[in-house]
Amino acid sequence: MRPKSLDGYIGQDKAIGKKSLLRSLLQTDQIPSLILWGPPGCGKTTLAKIIAQQCKSGSTLKFVQMSATTSGVNDVKEAVKVARNDQRMLRKKTVLFLDEIHRFNKTQQDSLLPHVEDGTIILIGATTENPSFQVNSALLSRCRVITLDKLEPSDLEHILTKAVLAVGGGILTEGCGPNEGEVSESDRKLVYIEQQALTTLSNLCDGDARAALNSLHMALQSRLCQHSSQSKDSCQSIRRPVVTSADVKEGLQRSHVLYDRAGEEHYNCISALHKSIRGSDATAALYWLARMLEGGENPLYVARRLIRVASEDVGLSDPTALTQAVSAYQACHLMGMPECDVVLAQCTCVLRIYTYLTMFIYRWS
C-alpha cells in the first residue's frame, strides 16, 4: 500500500505539501541531507522509498538503504567507498537512507560526518526519537530536520479505504447492505466492510497507519477464513462476509496509544496534563492522566508533577492546594497501582478547580 510518488502520499501537508520547499526540491532531484523525525507509522520510510523511486527513474542519483539496527560502521564505510567511485566514474551522487538512526551511538554517527560534509553522500535519517537528544549535534547541523506529525483520523480513513478497494473489497455506508442479488457475479466484492468500522479503526490507532493497516488486515482475514469454513460446511451459497466495528475492535483488542516512558512522548503527555490543569480543562486533564497510567507510567512521577502544579499555578492564592497534592503523593506511595488512579484523578480535578479560582481572582483583582 505504499505510494510510488508524492502525489499518492497522504497526510503531512505541512512538511511536504504542494507548496512546500521540500516538495519542490524532491521533484527537481535537489535532495538535501535530511533527518525525518516522527512517531511510528507516520510515513517516514514511505517518504524515503518515494525518493528511492525517483532515484531509479532518474540518472543522477543512486539510492542505498540501511538500518542502524542491523548495520555498523563497516557497512557505512563500504557504502561510502562505492559512492565515491560512482561520483568519480559515473557522476552520480548517492543518497544513503539510514533507518532508526538514533540506534547509532555518537562514535558511529561521527563516521558519517566527513562524507556528508564533502558531499560524497546525501544522508536521509529516520528516527522516532528527538534528534536534539539522540543525534550528534555536528551531524545535526549538516542536515535539515523534517518533523512529521501523527496522521489525522481523516488521513487514516483515506488510507484504509484505498486498502479495502485494492484487495477487491466493498464499503457499506450506514443503512445500505450488499444487495448481491441485484449485481452480477463478476461485480460482487470479495468482502464488505462497514464505513463505521473504518471510522472506528482510524480513531483508535492514534495516527499510526501501520497499526491501522495491520488491524484491518487481521479483521478481513478473520472474516474471510470464517466465511470459507461456513461455505464448506453448507451446500447453499451464503452472503459475502461483512466486517463490522465489533470485528475491528476485536482484532485491535485495545486502543493503540503511543506512549514511551523514557522517550519524547513521556514529556509530551506530562506537559499536556500540566497545561490542561492550567487551562481549567478537567476532561483534557483526565484524558492525559489516563493515557499515561494506561501506558505504564509510574504514578509517583505524576504525583510529583501535581505537587509542582499546586505550587506553580495555584501558589499563595490557596496554600491548601499544596497540602492536597502532597497527600495525593503519599496515598499513591501507600496504595500503588491500580488503586491509586482514583486518587490522582481526584487531585487533578481539585487542582483544576483551584487554578480556575486563581485565574478568577487575578482577573478581578
Image (cartoon, rainbow, N blue to C red):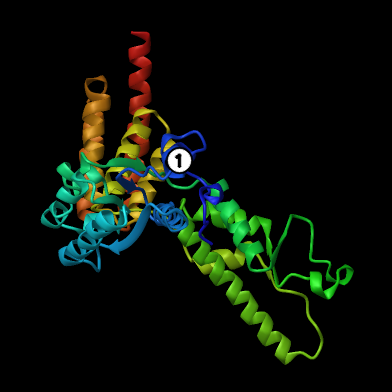
Point out residue 293 in the picture as x, y percentages from the top left corner. 33, 53
Q: Nearest the camera: 130 or 310?
A: 130
Name of the residue lying farthest toward the top: 365
The residue that mark 1 highlights is 23
Locate residue 312 relative to residue 238 in the image: left or right.
left
Which residue is at a point 35% across and 38% down the rendered structure image? Answer: 272
Q: Quadrant of residue 285?
A: top left
Query: How many badges with numbers are in the image?
Result: 1
Q: Nearest the camera: 205 or 13?
A: 13
Quadrant showing the C terminus = top left
User: Could one spot residue 229 in this view of the protein?
Assistant: yes
Q: Nearest the camera: 115 or 181?
A: 115
User: Could one spot residue 100 in this view of the protein?
Assistant: no
Locate residue 92 relative to residue 104 in the image: left or right.
right
Q: Is residue 242 above or below residue 16?
A: below
Q: Nearest the camera: 145 or 287?
A: 145
Name of the residue lying farthest toward the left: 107
Point out residue 136 in the picture as x, y percentages from the top left corner. 16, 47
Point out residue 104 in the picture as x, y percentages from the top left corner. 19, 58
Q: Quadrant of residue 84?
A: bottom left
Locate residue 195 relative to residue 105 in the image: left or right.
right
Point out residue 288 in the picture as x, y percentages from the top left corner. 38, 44
Which residue is at a point 46% across and 60% down the rendered structure image? Answer: 210
For the residue labelled by badge 1, is the local secondary structure a helix, a strand or a loop? helix
Name of the residue lying farthest toward the right: 182
Quadrant showing the N terminus = bottom right
Q: Is residue 84 above or below residue 324?
A: below
Q: What amino acid does circle 1 point to?
A: Arg
Which residue is at a point 63% across and 75% down the rendered structure image? Answer: 223
Which residue is at a point 45% across and 35% down the rendered structure image? Answer: 20
